[in-house]
Amino acid sequence: MYQLEQLLASRKSADPASSYTAKLYASGTKRIAQKVGEEGVETALAATVNDREELTNEASDLMYHLLVLLQDQDLDLSKVIGRLRERHEK
């Protein structure tokens, strides 16, 4: 996940024509957040029909788009993981 985060960070200022990720960043926060929402719904729906292959695909898409959103907002994955640890310790 951290390697993917680094790759996504490197695409943040890249030419939008160079990759889907760079194009997504160029489309702005609202579009990125919309993609996170769409992928979240698709992930939930895949779980309801017990299609593990589709669930794996959709969960991968969701995690990718969430990492893009976090990078867009200059929020490192380590910060999110740290918060999860804090919550677990309580």
Image: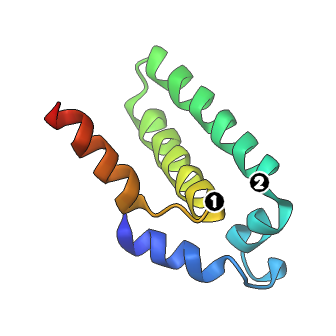
User: Which residue is painted at 46% across and 41% down in the image?
Assistant: 59
Color encoding of the figure: rainbow
**Looking at the image, do the residues carrying marks 2 and 1 touch, with CB atoms under 8 Å apart?**
yes
User: Residue 50 shows which numbered tag?
Assistant: none
Q: In the orientation shown, which residue stands out farthest toward the front?
A: 90
Q: In the orientation shown, which residue stands out farthest toward the left?
A: 89
Looking at the rendered image, the quarter that the C terminus falls into is: top left
Pointer 2 or 1: first along the chain? 2
Instruction: Please say if 55 is above or below 10.
Output: above
Image spot of residue 50 (x, y percent): 40, 19
User: Which residue is painted at 55% across and 48% down in the image?
Assistant: 61
Q: Amino acid at mark 1?
A: Gln
Q: In the orientation shown, which residue stands out farthest toward the top?
A: 48
Q: Label 1 belongs to which residue?
A: 73
Instruction: Please say if 55 is above or below 26.
Output: above
Picture quadrant of residue 16? bottom right
User: Which residue is painted at 44% across and 22% down in the image?
Assistant: 47
Image spot of residue 24 (x, y percent): 76, 63
Image spot of residue 36 (x, y percent): 64, 42
Q: Nearer the viewer, residue 6 or 75?
A: 75
Question: Is 79 on the left or on the right of 45, as rendered?
Answer: left
Q: Amino acid at mark 2?
A: Thr
Q: Secondary structure at mark 2?
A: helix
| Distance CA(mark 2)–CA(mark 1) | 8 Å
Question: Is 88 on the left or on the right of 46, as rendered?
Answer: left
User: Which residue is painted at 62% across and 55% down in the image?
Assistant: 69
Q: Secondary structure at mark 1?
A: loop
Image spot of residue 76 (x, y percent): 46, 64
* Total residue callouts: 2
Looking at the rendered image, the quarter that the N terminus falls into is: bottom left
Q: Label 2 belongs to which residue?
A: 29
Category of crowding for the residue at label 2, using alpha-carbon neighbours closer than 10 angstroms: few (below 14), some (14–19), many (at least 20): some
